[in-house]
Structures are given as C-alpha cells and as structure tokens.
Image: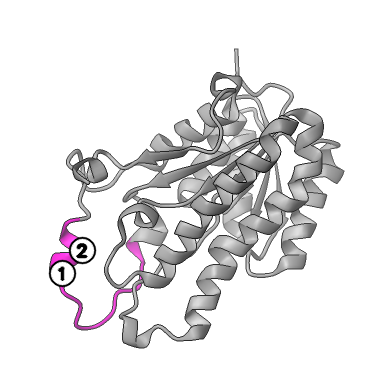
C-alpha cells in the first residue's frame, strides 16, 4: 500500500533533477503533488509524467528569491487541496566562485534562494502541517558539513539550512511537526552538469568530491530517502541530517 495515500505534498524545484525525481516518487507513494518552480515548462513536464503514471500533480509558478512568491506557493497548495502534509524544499542554485570574485550580491543571492526561501516556506507551511501532523524536508548538502573550495557562498547557505532545520525541529516537534534535512553528495542532475566553474581553479580540490561507489548518484536514489522521511516509517526521526553521498564523507 502506498505510504502517502490521501496526503498532499509540496515540492519546490520539481522541474528537473532531484526535485523532479522527488515529485514523481511522492506521487507514486500516493500523494497529490504541488510542484513549484521558476521553470514552468519543466514543471509541467514533471506533472505530465506523474499524471501519465496515474498520479495527481499541479504546477505553480514560483521564484525562490522572492518572499511573496514563497508565500503564494504555500497558499496555492492549501487552496487547491485544503490541507498540506509534506513540504520538500528542494529548489536551489549552485556555482563555484573564487573568494576574490565573490561579491556581496552573489553571496546574498545564494542566501536568498537556498536559505531564506526555506525559512519562509517552512514559516508559511507550519500552521497547516500542525493540523495534519505533517513534516518538512529541507535539502542541504554535504558541502554544509565538509566545506568545498570555491564554494563559500553555497556552503554558507547550505550550512544555514542545517541550522534552521534543527531549530524548527526543536520548536515544532512538540506540536507534531517533524523537520529533517537531506545532505546529498554529487548527483547526475542538470544543475551539476552545467555548474559554473571559475578560471584558474585547482582541480585537485574538486577531484576529492568523487564517491567511492560511482561518480554521481541518480536523483531517484535521494527521492527514495525523501519518501521515507515523509512517511510514518520515519515518525520518530526529527532534526536529523541524512547524508546521501555514496560514502564520500565516510572518511571525515
């Protein structure tokens, strides 16, 4: 029996990569999925895939860098379904910059998209999740735990996700809302393949990011972890950082 029957899940960044895989997996588990993404064409393609497999999905245009858009996304999901059970904050940006080219504007954009959006969406979702005993699943990164060269802005934003997740878990846990974070390693996604690299970088720093299993994981592998955390199978897991990296950080 699907573990999320009659549940409503909100997934950000569902147009591609891990967000797309997460939306498809949660729908396969029985949830009605609301997909929020700036790329509405890609999000609609994800929704069509879900519907083609017998699932339920809808799309809401969403800009993670805009607070009003974050607020509207949550409200749209609740307006459409009358409830909210699962929030998966997958949307994010990544790029490599040398420290000497990391401007304040670049740093702020990483914080806005990767961290502030999560805070706002969790804030807006909380009243609805309290009613359903729902959960939040925030995407951080192994970079938040180990640090990566040329990645200071990204690493800082993802470290913030871990801190926010722990705080929310402590605050809302007594009211029946769980909040956990996933820390993916390298995955075979469009974002990772098209990521910006700075000129003159020392590739020795990046070479150590390869997993002992395979260079890149498949998005479906992390989506399975999201489905677990969203289900009652994880009902006693709260405030955790679940690393999904093929053993990359096992040496730390």
Residue nearer the viewer, 31 or 92: 92
Q: Residue at x 29, y 63 (%)?
A: 148
Q: Are marks 1 and 2 in contact (CB under 8 Å)?
A: yes
Query: How far across and down, in percent of the image, does residue 7 sit?
Result: 72, 28
Q: Which residue: 53% across, 40% down?
A: 22
- Position above or below: 200 against 5: below
Query: Number of labelled discs?
Result: 2
Q: Which secondary structure, mark 2?
A: helix
Q: Quadrant of residue 108?
A: bottom right
Magenta stretch: helix, strand or loop mostly: loop
Q: Is residue 198 left or right of residue 236?
A: left
In the picture provided, is 8 more to the left or to the right than 140? right
Against 129, is 183 above or below? below
Label ID, residue 203: 1
User: Can residue 18 be seen?
Assistant: yes
Query: Could you tell me which residue is drawn at 51 percent across and 59 percent down?
Result: 160
Number of other residues with Cα within 10 Å of mark 1, as a class: few under 14, some 14 to 19, many 20 or more:
few
Q: Which residues are magenta?
A: 193-208
Nearer to me, 76 or 44: 76
Could you tell me if residue 89 is visible in this image? no
Question: In the image, is residue 187 part of the stretch drawn in magenta?
Answer: no
Q: What quarter of the picture does the N terminus occupy? A: top right
From the top left corner, tell me how far across and down residue 54 is, in percent: 64, 27
Q: Nearer the viewer, residue 157 or 214?
A: 157
**Is residue 196 part of the magenta span, yes or no?**
yes
**Residue for point 69% across, 53% down:** 121
Q: Position of residue 111 (x, y in %)?
A: 54, 69
Q: According to the image, label 2 marks what residue?
A: 206
């Amino acid at each position: 029996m699907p573990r999320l029957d009659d549940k409503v899940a909100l997934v950000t960044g569902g147009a591609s990569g891990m967000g797309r895989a997460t939306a498809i997996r949660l729908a396969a588990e029985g949830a009605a999925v609301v997909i929020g993404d700036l790329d509405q064409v890609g999000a609609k393609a994800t929704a069509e895939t879900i519907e083609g497999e017998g699932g339920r999905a809808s799309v809401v245009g969403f800009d993670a860098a805009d607070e009003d858009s974050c607020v509207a996304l949550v409200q749209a999901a609740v307006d459409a379904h009358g409830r909210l059970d699962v929030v998966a904050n997958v949307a994010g940006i990544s790029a490599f910059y040398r420290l000497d080219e990391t401007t304040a504007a670049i740093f702020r954009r990483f914080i806005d998209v990767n961290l502030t959006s999560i805070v706002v969406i969790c804030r807006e979702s909380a009243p609805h999740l309290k009613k359903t005993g729902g959960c939040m699943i925030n995407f951080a990164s192994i970079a938040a735990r180990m640090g990566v060269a040329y990645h200071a802005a990204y690493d800082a934003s993802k470290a913030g996700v871990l801190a926010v997740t722990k705080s929310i878990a402590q605050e809302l846990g007594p009211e029946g809302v769980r909040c956990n974070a996933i820390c993916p390693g390298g995955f075979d996604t469009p974002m990772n393949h098209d990521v910006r690299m700075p000129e003159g970088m020392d590739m020795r720093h990046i070479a150590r990011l390869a997993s002992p299993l395979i260079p890149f994981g498949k998005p479906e592998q992390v989506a399975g972890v999201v489905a677990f955390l969203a289900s009652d199978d994880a009902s006693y897991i709260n405030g955790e950082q679940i690393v999904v990296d093929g053993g990359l950080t096992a040496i730390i």
